Image (cartoon, rainbow, N blue to C red):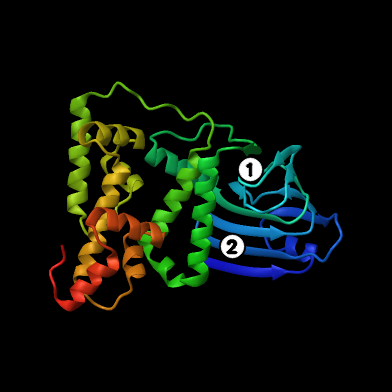
Protein backbone atom coordinates (compact mmCIF):
# COMPACT_ATOMS: atom_id res chain seq x y z
CA UNK A 1 0.00 0.00 0.00
CA UNK A 2 1.32 3.46 -0.92
CA UNK A 3 -0.36 6.81 -0.24
CA UNK A 4 0.64 10.23 -1.63
CA UNK A 5 -0.85 13.68 -1.00
CA UNK A 6 0.92 16.42 -2.96
CA UNK A 7 0.09 20.06 -3.74
CA UNK A 8 1.57 21.75 -6.82
CA UNK A 9 1.87 25.37 -7.95
CA UNK A 10 3.05 24.83 -11.52
CA UNK A 11 1.30 23.02 -14.36
CA UNK A 12 4.44 21.16 -15.49
CA UNK A 13 5.26 20.16 -11.95
CA UNK A 14 1.75 18.80 -11.63
CA UNK A 15 1.94 16.78 -14.85
CA UNK A 16 4.96 14.95 -13.45
CA UNK A 17 3.07 13.75 -10.37
CA UNK A 18 1.76 10.72 -12.29
CA UNK A 19 5.01 9.46 -13.85
CA UNK A 20 3.45 6.26 -15.22
CA UNK A 21 1.04 8.34 -17.34
CA UNK A 22 2.46 9.73 -20.57
CA UNK A 23 0.83 13.15 -20.57
CA UNK A 24 1.34 16.88 -21.02
CA UNK A 25 -0.53 19.75 -19.33
CA UNK A 26 -0.82 23.27 -20.72
CA UNK A 27 -2.39 26.14 -18.78
CA UNK A 28 -4.76 28.05 -21.08
CA UNK A 29 -6.38 30.67 -18.83
CA UNK A 30 -4.95 33.36 -16.60
CA UNK A 31 -4.30 32.96 -12.90
CA UNK A 32 -1.91 31.21 -10.56
CA UNK A 33 -2.00 27.45 -11.05
CA UNK A 34 -3.07 25.31 -8.12
CA UNK A 35 -3.08 21.53 -8.26
CA UNK A 36 -3.49 18.65 -5.83
CA UNK A 37 -3.09 14.91 -6.15
CA UNK A 38 -4.15 12.27 -3.64
CA UNK A 39 -3.15 8.80 -4.72
CA UNK A 40 -3.50 5.40 -3.02
CA UNK A 41 -2.07 2.23 -4.53
CA UNK A 42 -3.60 -1.09 -3.47
CA UNK A 43 -1.53 -3.39 -5.64
CA UNK A 44 -3.15 -3.72 -9.06
CA UNK A 45 -5.83 -1.17 -8.12
CA UNK A 46 -5.14 2.55 -7.71
CA UNK A 47 -7.50 5.28 -6.55
CA UNK A 48 -6.78 8.97 -6.85
CA UNK A 49 -8.28 12.43 -6.73
CA UNK A 50 -6.84 15.13 -8.94
CA UNK A 51 -7.63 18.84 -8.76
CA UNK A 52 -6.38 21.41 -11.28
CA UNK A 53 -7.07 25.05 -11.97
CA UNK A 54 -7.39 27.38 -13.76
CA UNK A 55 -8.21 25.93 -17.18
CA UNK A 56 -5.77 23.41 -18.64
CA UNK A 57 -5.53 21.16 -21.68
CA UNK A 58 -4.28 17.64 -21.05
CA UNK A 59 -3.14 15.17 -23.68
CA UNK A 60 -1.43 11.83 -23.49
CA UNK A 61 -2.19 8.25 -22.52
CA UNK A 62 -2.85 6.33 -19.31
CA UNK A 63 -0.60 3.95 -17.44
CA UNK A 64 0.23 0.94 -19.61
CA UNK A 65 -2.19 -1.99 -19.45
CA UNK A 66 -4.87 -0.23 -17.40
CA UNK A 67 -8.44 0.97 -17.47
CA UNK A 68 -9.26 4.18 -15.60
CA UNK A 69 -12.72 5.47 -14.72
CA UNK A 70 -13.05 8.97 -13.27
CA UNK A 71 -16.01 11.02 -12.01
CA UNK A 72 -16.15 14.81 -12.26
CA UNK A 73 -16.99 15.98 -8.74
CA UNK A 74 -19.66 18.54 -7.77
CA UNK A 75 -18.60 22.17 -8.03
CA UNK A 76 -15.99 21.74 -10.73
CA UNK A 77 -16.06 23.41 -14.12
CA UNK A 78 -17.26 21.76 -17.31
CA UNK A 79 -14.63 19.95 -19.38
CA UNK A 80 -14.39 18.53 -22.89
CA UNK A 81 -13.13 14.98 -23.34
CA UNK A 82 -12.42 14.04 -26.97
CA UNK A 83 -15.09 16.47 -28.13
CA UNK A 84 -17.74 15.44 -25.59
CA UNK A 85 -18.90 17.59 -22.70
CA UNK A 86 -18.16 16.31 -19.19
CA UNK A 87 -20.25 17.93 -16.46
CA UNK A 88 -20.08 17.42 -12.68
CA UNK A 89 -21.50 14.02 -11.79
CA UNK A 90 -20.58 12.41 -15.11
CA UNK A 91 -17.76 9.92 -15.58
CA UNK A 92 -15.19 9.26 -18.28
CA UNK A 93 -13.12 6.18 -19.12
CA UNK A 94 -9.49 6.19 -20.23
CA UNK A 95 -7.96 3.04 -21.74
CA UNK A 96 -4.20 2.71 -22.01
CA UNK A 97 -2.63 2.64 -25.45
CA UNK A 98 -5.07 5.22 -26.78
CA UNK A 99 -4.26 8.91 -26.70
CA UNK A 100 -6.79 11.27 -25.17
CA UNK A 101 -7.41 15.02 -24.87
CA UNK A 102 -9.13 16.69 -21.93
CA UNK A 103 -9.78 20.44 -21.93
CA UNK A 104 -11.09 22.00 -18.71
CA UNK A 105 -12.87 25.34 -18.49
CA UNK A 106 -11.64 26.18 -14.99
CA UNK A 107 -11.08 24.35 -11.72
CA UNK A 108 -11.52 20.63 -12.41
CA UNK A 109 -11.85 17.98 -9.70
CA UNK A 110 -11.99 14.26 -10.51
CA UNK A 111 -12.14 11.09 -8.37
CA UNK A 112 -10.88 8.03 -10.22
CA UNK A 113 -9.96 4.36 -10.03
CA UNK A 114 -7.40 2.66 -12.25
CA UNK A 115 -6.97 -1.12 -12.50
CA UNK A 116 -4.68 -3.45 -14.42
CA UNK A 117 -6.69 -4.96 -17.29
CA UNK A 118 -5.07 -8.39 -16.85
CA UNK A 119 -6.14 -8.50 -13.20
CA UNK A 120 -9.62 -7.23 -14.04
CA UNK A 121 -9.94 -9.98 -16.65
CA UNK A 122 -8.80 -12.63 -14.14
CA UNK A 123 -11.27 -11.25 -11.58
CA UNK A 124 -14.09 -11.41 -14.15
CA UNK A 125 -13.29 -15.05 -14.89
CA UNK A 126 -13.27 -15.96 -11.18
CA UNK A 127 -16.43 -14.08 -10.27
CA UNK A 128 -18.51 -13.91 -13.45
CA UNK A 129 -17.33 -17.18 -14.96
CA UNK A 130 -16.29 -15.48 -18.21
CA UNK A 131 -13.43 -13.33 -19.49
CA UNK A 132 -13.83 -9.71 -20.44
CA UNK A 133 -15.26 -9.06 -23.88
CA UNK A 134 -12.56 -7.81 -26.25
CA UNK A 135 -11.62 -5.40 -27.61
CA UNK A 136 -11.78 -3.44 -24.35
CA UNK A 137 -14.02 -0.43 -23.89
CA UNK A 138 -12.85 2.74 -25.57
CA UNK A 139 -12.56 6.25 -24.24
CA UNK A 140 -16.10 7.29 -23.34
CA UNK A 141 -18.29 9.62 -21.28
CA UNK A 142 -21.00 8.04 -19.12
CA UNK A 143 -24.12 9.51 -17.59
CA UNK A 144 -25.04 6.94 -14.94
CA UNK A 145 -26.03 9.01 -11.92
CA UNK A 146 -26.25 6.12 -9.44
CA UNK A 147 -23.10 4.35 -10.64
CA UNK A 148 -21.08 7.56 -10.86
CA UNK A 149 -22.17 8.66 -7.38
CA UNK A 150 -21.27 5.24 -5.94
CA UNK A 151 -17.81 5.36 -7.52
CA UNK A 152 -17.12 8.91 -6.35
CA UNK A 153 -18.27 8.13 -2.81
CA UNK A 154 -16.13 5.00 -2.61
CA UNK A 155 -12.99 6.72 -3.93
CA UNK A 156 -13.39 9.71 -1.59
CA UNK A 157 -14.08 7.46 1.41
CA UNK A 158 -11.02 5.31 0.70
CA UNK A 159 -8.77 8.36 0.31
CA UNK A 160 -10.14 9.94 3.50
CA UNK A 161 -9.37 6.70 5.35
CA UNK A 162 -5.82 6.63 3.96
CA UNK A 163 -5.34 10.26 4.98
CA UNK A 164 -6.94 10.24 8.44
CA UNK A 165 -6.86 6.61 9.63
CA UNK A 166 -4.17 4.81 7.61
CA UNK A 167 -3.88 2.00 10.17
CA UNK A 168 -7.33 0.75 9.13
CA UNK A 169 -6.02 -0.04 5.66
CA UNK A 170 -3.48 -2.43 7.18
CA UNK A 171 -6.36 -4.89 7.59
CA UNK A 172 -6.07 -7.50 4.81
CA UNK A 173 -9.84 -8.07 4.78
CA UNK A 174 -10.51 -4.38 4.23
CA UNK A 175 -8.00 -4.10 1.39
CA UNK A 176 -9.48 -7.17 -0.30
CA UNK A 177 -13.00 -5.85 0.10
CA UNK A 178 -12.02 -2.47 -1.35
CA UNK A 179 -10.26 -3.96 -4.38
CA UNK A 180 -13.26 -6.14 -5.14
CA UNK A 181 -15.76 -3.30 -4.75
CA UNK A 182 -13.73 -1.12 -7.12
CA UNK A 183 -13.39 -3.91 -9.68
CA UNK A 184 -17.14 -4.52 -9.51
CA UNK A 185 -17.82 -0.88 -10.38
CA UNK A 186 -15.54 -1.15 -13.41
CA UNK A 187 -17.04 -4.45 -14.57
CA UNK A 188 -20.51 -2.89 -14.44
CA UNK A 189 -19.41 -0.46 -17.20
CA UNK A 190 -17.77 -3.08 -19.40
CA UNK A 191 -19.52 -3.58 -22.75
CA UNK A 192 -20.84 -6.96 -23.79
CA UNK A 193 -21.75 -8.29 -20.33
CA UNK A 194 -24.15 -11.16 -20.85
CA UNK A 195 -27.45 -11.39 -18.97
CA UNK A 196 -27.80 -14.13 -16.41
CA UNK A 197 -28.88 -17.52 -17.65
CA UNK A 198 -32.40 -18.45 -16.59
CA UNK A 199 -32.26 -22.21 -17.17
CA UNK A 200 -30.75 -23.26 -13.82
CA UNK A 201 -33.10 -25.63 -12.00
CA UNK A 202 -34.54 -25.06 -8.53
CA UNK A 203 -32.64 -28.10 -7.22
CA UNK A 204 -29.37 -26.70 -8.57
CA UNK A 205 -29.97 -23.36 -6.90
CA UNK A 206 -30.71 -25.09 -3.62
CA UNK A 207 -27.42 -27.00 -3.91
CA UNK A 208 -25.59 -23.75 -4.62
CA UNK A 209 -27.04 -22.11 -1.49
CA UNK A 210 -26.23 -25.19 0.65
CA UNK A 211 -22.64 -25.20 -0.60
CA UNK A 212 -22.32 -21.46 0.04
CA UNK A 213 -23.70 -21.68 3.57
CA UNK A 214 -21.45 -24.65 4.34
CA UNK A 215 -18.42 -22.65 3.23
CA UNK A 216 -19.57 -19.71 5.35
CA UNK A 217 -19.99 -21.97 8.40
CA UNK A 218 -16.51 -23.42 7.93
CA UNK A 219 -15.06 -19.90 7.81
CA UNK A 220 -17.26 -18.27 10.42
CA UNK A 221 -14.49 -16.01 11.73
CA UNK A 222 -13.46 -14.72 8.30
CA UNK A 223 -14.72 -11.68 6.39
CA UNK A 224 -15.96 -13.63 3.38
CA UNK A 225 -16.78 -11.70 0.22
CA UNK A 226 -19.00 -12.61 -2.73
CA UNK A 227 -16.04 -13.04 -5.14
CA UNK A 228 -14.29 -15.34 -2.65
CA UNK A 229 -17.48 -17.35 -2.25
CA UNK A 230 -17.95 -17.69 -6.01
CA UNK A 231 -14.40 -18.95 -6.40
CA UNK A 232 -14.70 -21.37 -3.47
CA UNK A 233 -17.87 -23.12 -4.70
CA UNK A 234 -17.12 -22.72 -8.44
CA UNK A 235 -20.14 -20.71 -9.57
CA UNK A 236 -20.54 -17.34 -11.26
CA UNK A 237 -21.82 -14.35 -9.35
CA UNK A 238 -25.00 -14.33 -11.41
CA UNK A 239 -25.71 -17.97 -10.53
CA UNK A 240 -25.08 -17.21 -6.86
CA UNK A 241 -27.32 -14.14 -7.02
CA UNK A 242 -30.24 -15.98 -8.57
CA UNK A 243 -29.84 -18.95 -6.22
CA UNK A 244 -29.91 -16.85 -3.04
CA UNK A 245 -32.76 -14.70 -4.29
CA UNK A 246 -34.92 -17.72 -5.09
CA UNK A 247 -34.03 -19.91 -2.10
CA UNK A 248 -33.63 -17.34 0.70
CA UNK A 249 -35.39 -14.30 -0.73
CA UNK A 250 -32.31 -12.10 -0.37
CA UNK A 251 -29.12 -11.39 -2.27
CA UNK A 252 -25.81 -12.99 -1.26
CA UNK A 253 -24.52 -9.49 -0.56
CA UNK A 254 -27.27 -8.92 1.99
CA UNK A 255 -26.70 -12.32 3.57
CA UNK A 256 -22.92 -11.86 3.79
CA UNK A 257 -23.33 -8.35 5.20
CA UNK A 258 -25.46 -9.79 7.99
CA UNK A 259 -22.81 -12.44 8.71
CA UNK A 260 -20.06 -9.82 8.81
CA UNK A 261 -22.12 -7.59 11.10
CA UNK A 262 -22.59 -10.56 13.41
CA UNK A 263 -18.85 -11.11 13.32
CA UNK A 264 -18.19 -7.53 14.45
CA UNK A 265 -20.81 -7.94 17.17
CA UNK A 266 -19.09 -11.04 18.54
CA UNK A 267 -15.83 -9.10 18.74
CA UNK A 268 -17.49 -6.17 20.47
CA UNK A 269 -19.12 -8.48 23.01
CA UNK A 270 -15.70 -9.79 24.01
CA UNK A 271 -14.82 -6.36 25.38
CA UNK A 272 -11.34 -4.88 25.18
CA UNK A 273 -10.02 -1.48 24.15
CA UNK A 274 -9.60 -1.98 20.40
CA UNK A 275 -11.43 0.85 18.58
CA UNK A 276 -14.71 0.04 16.87
CA UNK A 277 -13.33 1.28 13.54
CA UNK A 278 -10.48 -1.25 13.66
CA UNK A 279 -12.85 -4.10 14.49
CA UNK A 280 -15.13 -3.09 11.64
CA UNK A 281 -12.17 -2.90 9.25
CA UNK A 282 -11.18 -6.45 10.19
CA UNK A 283 -14.55 -7.54 8.83
CA UNK A 284 -14.24 -5.51 5.63
CA UNK A 285 -16.30 -2.42 6.57
CA UNK A 286 -14.67 0.83 5.41
CA UNK A 287 -17.62 3.26 5.52
CA UNK A 288 -18.10 3.78 9.26
CA UNK A 289 -21.35 5.75 9.22
CA UNK A 290 -22.97 3.21 6.90
CA UNK A 291 -21.62 0.36 9.02
CA UNK A 292 -23.10 1.91 12.17
CA UNK A 293 -26.46 2.45 10.43
CA UNK A 294 -26.59 -1.15 9.15
CA UNK A 295 -25.57 -2.42 12.58
CA UNK A 296 -28.34 -0.46 14.26
CA UNK A 297 -30.96 -1.68 11.79
CA UNK A 298 -29.95 -5.32 12.33
CA UNK A 299 -29.44 -5.30 16.10
CA UNK A 300 -31.49 -2.35 17.33
CA UNK A 301 -28.51 -0.60 18.88
CA UNK A 302 -25.30 1.12 17.86
CA UNK A 303 -21.90 -0.63 17.98
CA UNK A 304 -20.91 1.73 20.80
CA UNK A 305 -23.89 0.48 22.83
CA UNK A 306 -22.71 -3.12 22.41
CA UNK A 307 -19.18 -2.23 23.44
CA UNK A 308 -20.40 -0.25 26.44
CA UNK A 309 -22.56 -3.13 27.61
CA UNK A 310 -19.62 -5.54 27.27
CA UNK A 311 -17.41 -3.26 29.36
CA UNK A 312 -20.11 -2.94 32.00
CA UNK A 313 -20.57 -6.70 32.12
CA UNK A 314 -24.23 -6.49 31.08
CA UNK A 315 -26.06 -8.82 28.72
CA UNK A 316 -26.46 -7.39 25.24
CA UNK A 317 -29.90 -7.61 23.65
* Depicted 188 relative to depicted 256: above or below: above
Task: Tell whether 248 sits left or right of 88.
Answer: left
Q: Tag on residue 73?
A: none
Q: Residues within 10 Å of mark 2 (few under 14, many from 20)?
A: many
Measured as percent of width and height from the top left, residue 194 is found at 44, 27
- Nearer-the-camera pick, 50 or 19: 50
Residue at horizontal 25 percent and vertical 62 percent from the top: 301
Measured as percent of width and height from the top left, residue 308 is found at 23, 74
Q: Secondary structure at mark 2?
A: strand
- Nearer-the-camera pick, 34 or 4: 34
* Quadrant in which the C terminus is drawn: bottom left
Judging by the rendered image, the residue that carries numbered circle 2 is: 39
Task: Tell whether 292 sits left or right of 62.
Answer: left
Task: Tell whether 252 sits left or right of 163.
Answer: left
Residue at horizontal 29 percent and vertical 42 percent from the top: 252
**Any part of residue 100 in sight:** no
Nearer to us of marks 1 and 2 is: 1
Q: Residues within 10 Å of mark 1 (few under 14, many from 20)?
A: many
- Residue extending farthest front: 300
Label 1 to label 2, Cα distance in Å?
Answer: 18 Å
Q: Tag on residue 92?
A: 1
- Residue extending farthest top: 199
Measured as percent of width and height from the top left, residue 1 is found at 49, 65
Instruction: Give the mark, 1 or 2, whose residue is nearer the N terminus.
Output: 2
Q: Secondary structure at mark 1?
A: strand
**Any part of residue 279 in sight:** yes
Disc 1 vs disc 2: Cβ atoms closer than 8 Å?
A: no
* Depicted 6 relative to depicted 59: above or below: below
Measured as percent of width and height from the top left, residue 34 is found at 75, 65
- Nearer-the-camera pick, 223 or 122: 223
Residue at horizontal 32 percent and vertical 22 percent from the top: 198
Amino acid sequence: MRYLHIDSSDVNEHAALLPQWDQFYEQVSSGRFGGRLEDLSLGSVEVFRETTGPAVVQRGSARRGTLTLGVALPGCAEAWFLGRSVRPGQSLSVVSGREFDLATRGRFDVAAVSVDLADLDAYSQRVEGEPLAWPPMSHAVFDDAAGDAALAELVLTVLATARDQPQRLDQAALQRSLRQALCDLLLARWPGRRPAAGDVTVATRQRVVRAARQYMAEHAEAAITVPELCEAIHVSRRTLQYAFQEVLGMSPVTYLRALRLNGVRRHLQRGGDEPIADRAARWGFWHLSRFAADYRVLFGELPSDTMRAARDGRNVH
